[in-house]
Image (cartoon, coloured by chain):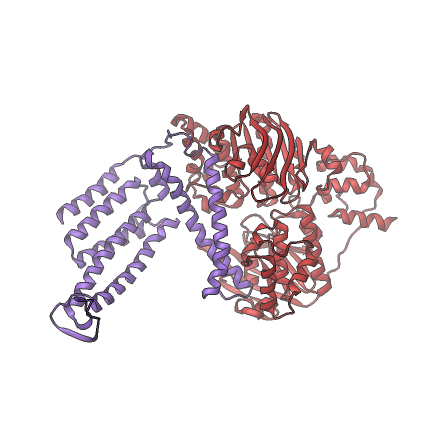
Chain colours: A purple, B red
């Protein structure tokens, strides 16, 4: 197993940007799948037990959805590509003021494969970016960003600390409501959970904002850095690899 | 150091004043304790010191507050950051960074301190609060006591002259609480730090306080030495009540003082052997070889026990010892690795809906998790509907528990004690066979605690039901529990009558028993009844 090193927070973002550009330029589903596979191995080997590391798994799930939805829509609506007919969907008659749009009709192998491969390339880019965010702590990223966008940090800190707590709160409230013998799914249950949840997260955000304020955040425009984060050799290596892949594509 | 001149405070959309015409001067190097019933404005008073009230909350402030000569009316809270460190009621809500070290430097970076100053101070503060082994740990993995220490450290690291703490020990077990308080005590004496603390559990802090600010419900505050205030105040820790009951001329604030004062009394009393014969009823809960692990770590290791009718069982132990896990297992909401929990002969995991309500009543750590309606009234009506009982029954229960709660009030606007009472009456309306409470006394004042004790004892005695309660509050256990289970690291360490378990552990012994040792009395009521038996 790879040793868990700490990298410069920008390293993975630059690397992933380069890979994403490469995927877009090569525009081949095979290359995209390979890149996602390589990235997955990397993310798993570097996995930390932090709330943001889960974003990678979520993006994979999301991608499968996107591909599925895109394929269905791409097959039903869109420009027909001639070729081997797989099956037919009845054509929906549209009123005359909607010319040029066709819903249904012949589904060809070419049409299907082109929409799947487009979907894969798009999703690969999404997954690559979420890999970058799951490899980098948003708090550390915040610390290397230039001072003039630091102001916007207050919202990032609140969002990144309140969101994971929100997930924990949902679980807690659902359990409590189950103990009251209430159902925990359905529209009514959603309301029952949403109300205490909203109240709590609001109170929590206010607490956090008050705490940051009383610790002098944003009061002085200058801000010093404890342990400035250095760009090490390994960071240069990773960034260079990314750029080479991008150049070769 | 801190000066309040003619301070009055009113919140927007409110008709009552939170604080009325308060004059107070706190000199440097003093530890001041703010006491008062829940909702009396203790937190507001603390947040006035660095201007979070009214800068953050709104409200009308009359009079002037100055800290080290700076008026809070003129400066925003951020402008006082170098002067005042503030630790809120729930430190977990206020963390801004991932790791301990980053959290510590956050305030210093904001104050633009130079790098070598920061490095020195981080090392200093890590040593001072014994946090060195935790420096690279993620904050989310720390225990409650450790988090509290990190919060105090990150407030102190900027070298403020004033430290303000809102209920610093309410979530801590007695040992962790003592640790935090003795650190504060040392800071006051070594560095002449000015400390202002609000706390309900007076028995924990009273011995460290130089002065007390007592706010009664109507916004009127009185200031004085602990002896002066506690002689007459309605809020008093058990040892002060003991002094009052025994009719002592002086009151002692520490166990040592009280032992001196009661020397004569103790010697005149015969040491009785109380053999609390346990009345064994039917087993309501049966826990067999229970084992629970989270993320590879054992939370509960092979616990077997039974809970009987008519019993009030307290589960005690350090923060993170597995108390909540055991409660959750009894309530049937944990993922058990092995073993079983039977409640009234049924697997507690499989209970659903009405059957569940009628078997187990569970009050979670945040009672408001159970509540979702927009008013007390509709909350009660919903409970009536759920349980198919006559309309108004739940409201009736609530009125019996705590009279005088407005029907139209929003549950969120109630005080902690009132909210707990509402959640309790919703749960009790289903008439459960067993009542389970997780840490119910957080944020409760003595008055609310007394009401809770009475409710629970009545429930167990009158209806012959059982109650299981997990708590850090030694005094509550002494008042309430018939049996105490002590767990550490997920293992059952002691299980016996409350008197046996509490007396055998110095850290978990209540104040009265420490004063009265070797007499086996845990509470003021025990002493009174012993006196009555003699006379």
Nearest the viewer among A105 and B111 is A105
Give the vertical position of B76 relative to B457 (above or below). above
Q: Residue at x 40, y 40 (%)?
A: A154
Can I make out residue B351 in this image? no
Query: Where is residue A80 shown, x and y percent of the image?
Result: 15, 68
Left or right: B517 as drawn, with respect to A162: right
| A66 to the left or right of B135 | left
How many numbered discs, if any? 0
x and y, in percent, of residue B132 in the image: 47, 36
On the image, the x and y values in percent for residue B528 come to 80, 48
Pick the residue in front: B479 or A193.
A193
The residue furthest left is A83
Instruction: Inspect this view and state whether residue B94 appears.
Output: yes
**Quick one: which residue is furthest to the right in this view?**
B535
Q: Residue furthest front?
A: A97
Question: Residue shown at 58%/60% (left/top)?
Answer: B379
Q: Position of residue B124 (x, y in %)?
A: 48, 29
B490 or B361, nearer to the observer: B361
Residue B312 quadrant:
bottom right
| x 85%, y 49%: residue | B532
In the displayed structure, B384 sits above or below B176; it is: below
Q: Answer above or below: position of A227 versus B369.
A: above
State left or right for residue A221 relative to residue A33.
right
Residue B343, relative to residue B107: is it above or below? below
Residue in the image at 68% along x and 40% along y: B216
């Amino acid at each position: 197993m790879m040793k868990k090193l700490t990298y410069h927070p920008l390293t993975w973002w630059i690397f992933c940007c380069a890979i994403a550009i490469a995927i877009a330029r090569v525009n081949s589903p095979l290359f995209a799948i390979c890149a996602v596979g390589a990235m997955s191995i990397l993310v798993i080997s570097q996995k930390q037990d932090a709330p943001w590391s889960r974003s990678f798994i979520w993006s994979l799930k999301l991608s499968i959805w996107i591909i599925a939805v895109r394929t269905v829509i791409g097959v039903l609506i869109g420009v027909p590509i001639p070729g081997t007919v797989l099956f037919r969907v009845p054509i929906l008659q549209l009123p005359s003021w909607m010319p040029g749009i066709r819903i249904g009709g012949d589904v060809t192998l070419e049409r299907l494969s082109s929409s799947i491969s487009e979907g894969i390339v798009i999703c690969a880019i999404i997954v690559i970016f979420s890999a970058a965010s799951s490899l980098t702590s948003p708090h550390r990223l915040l610390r290397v960003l230039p001072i003039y966008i630091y102001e916007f940090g207050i919202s990032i800190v609140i969002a990144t600390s309140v969101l994971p707590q929100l997930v924990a709160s949902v679980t807690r409230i659902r359990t409590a409501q189950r103990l009251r013998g209430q159902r925990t799914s359905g529209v009514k249950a959603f309301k029952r959970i949403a109300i205490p949840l909203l109240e709590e997260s609001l109170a929590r955000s206010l607490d956090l904002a008050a705490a940051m304020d009383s610790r002098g955040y944003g009061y002085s425009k200058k801000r010093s850095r404890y342990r400035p984060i250095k760009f090490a050799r390994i960071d240069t290596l990773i960034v260079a690899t990314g750029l080479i892949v991008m150049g070769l594509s | 150091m801190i000066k309040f001149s003619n301070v009055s405070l009113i919140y927007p959309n409110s008709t009552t004043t939170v604080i009325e015409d308060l004059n107070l001067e706190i000199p440097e190097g003093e530890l001041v304790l703010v006491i008062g019933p829940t909702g009396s404005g203790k937190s507001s008073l603390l947040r006035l010191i660095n201007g979070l009230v009214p800068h953050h909350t709104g409200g009308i402030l009359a009079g002037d507050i100055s800290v080290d000569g700076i008026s809070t009316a003129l400066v925003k809270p951020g402008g006082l950051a170098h002067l005042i460190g503030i630790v809120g009621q729930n430190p977990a809500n206020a963390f801004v960074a991932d790791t301990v070290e980053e959290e510590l430097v956050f305030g210093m970076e904001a104050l633009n301190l130079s790098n070598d100053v920061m490095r020195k101070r981080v090392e200093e503060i890590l040593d001072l609060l014994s946090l060195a082994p935790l420096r690279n740990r993620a904050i989310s993995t720390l225990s409650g006591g450790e988090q509290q220490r990190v919060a105090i450290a990150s407030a102190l690291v900027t070298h403020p002259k004033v430290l303000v703490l809102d209920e610093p020990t309410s979530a801590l077990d007695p040992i962790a609480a003592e640790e935090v308080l003795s650190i504060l005590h040392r800071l006051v004496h070594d560095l002449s730090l000015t400390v202002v603390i609000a706390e309900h559990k007076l028995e924990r802090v009273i011995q460290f306080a130089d002065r007390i600010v007592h706010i009664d419900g109507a916004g009127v505050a009185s200031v004085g030495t602990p002896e002066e205030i506690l002689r007459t105040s309605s809020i008093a820790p058990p040892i002060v009540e003991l002094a009052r009951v025994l009719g002592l001329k002086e009151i002692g604030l520490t166990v040592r003082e009280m032992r001196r004062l009661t020397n004569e009394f103790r010697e005149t009393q015969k040491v009785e052997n109380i053999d609390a014969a346990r009345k064994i009823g039917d087993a309501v809960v049966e826990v067999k070889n229970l084992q629970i692990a989270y993320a590879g770590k054992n939370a509960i290791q092979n616990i077997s026990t039974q809970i009987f009718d008519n019993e009030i069982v307290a589960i005690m132990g350090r923060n993170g010892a597995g108390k909540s896990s055991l409660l959750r297992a009894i309530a049937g909401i944990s993922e058990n690795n092995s073993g079983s929990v039977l409640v009234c002969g049924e697997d507690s995991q499989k209970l659903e809906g009405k059957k569940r309500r009628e078997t187990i009543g569970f009050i979670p750590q945040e009672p408001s998790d159970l509540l979702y309606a927009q008013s007390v009234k509709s909350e009660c009506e919903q409970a009536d509907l759920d349980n198919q009982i006559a309309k108004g029954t739940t409201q009736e229960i609530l009125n019996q528990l705590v009279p005088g709660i407005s029907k139209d009030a929003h549950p969120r606007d109630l005080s902690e004690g009132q909210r707990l009472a509402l959640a309790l009456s919703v749960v009790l309306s289903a008439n459960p066979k067993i009542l389970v409470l997780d840490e119910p006394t957080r944020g409760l004042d003595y008055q609310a605690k007394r009401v809770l004790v009475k409710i629970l004892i009545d429930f167990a005695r009158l209806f012959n039901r059982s109650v299981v309660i997990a708590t850090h509050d030694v005094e509550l256990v002494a008042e309430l529990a018939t049996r105490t289970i002590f767990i550490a690291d997920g293992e059952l360490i002691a299980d016996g009558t409350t008197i046996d378990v509490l007396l055998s552990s110095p850290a978990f012994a209540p104040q009265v028993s420490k004063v009265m040792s070797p007499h086996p009395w845990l509470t003021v009521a025990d002493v009174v009844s012993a006196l009555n038996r003699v006379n």
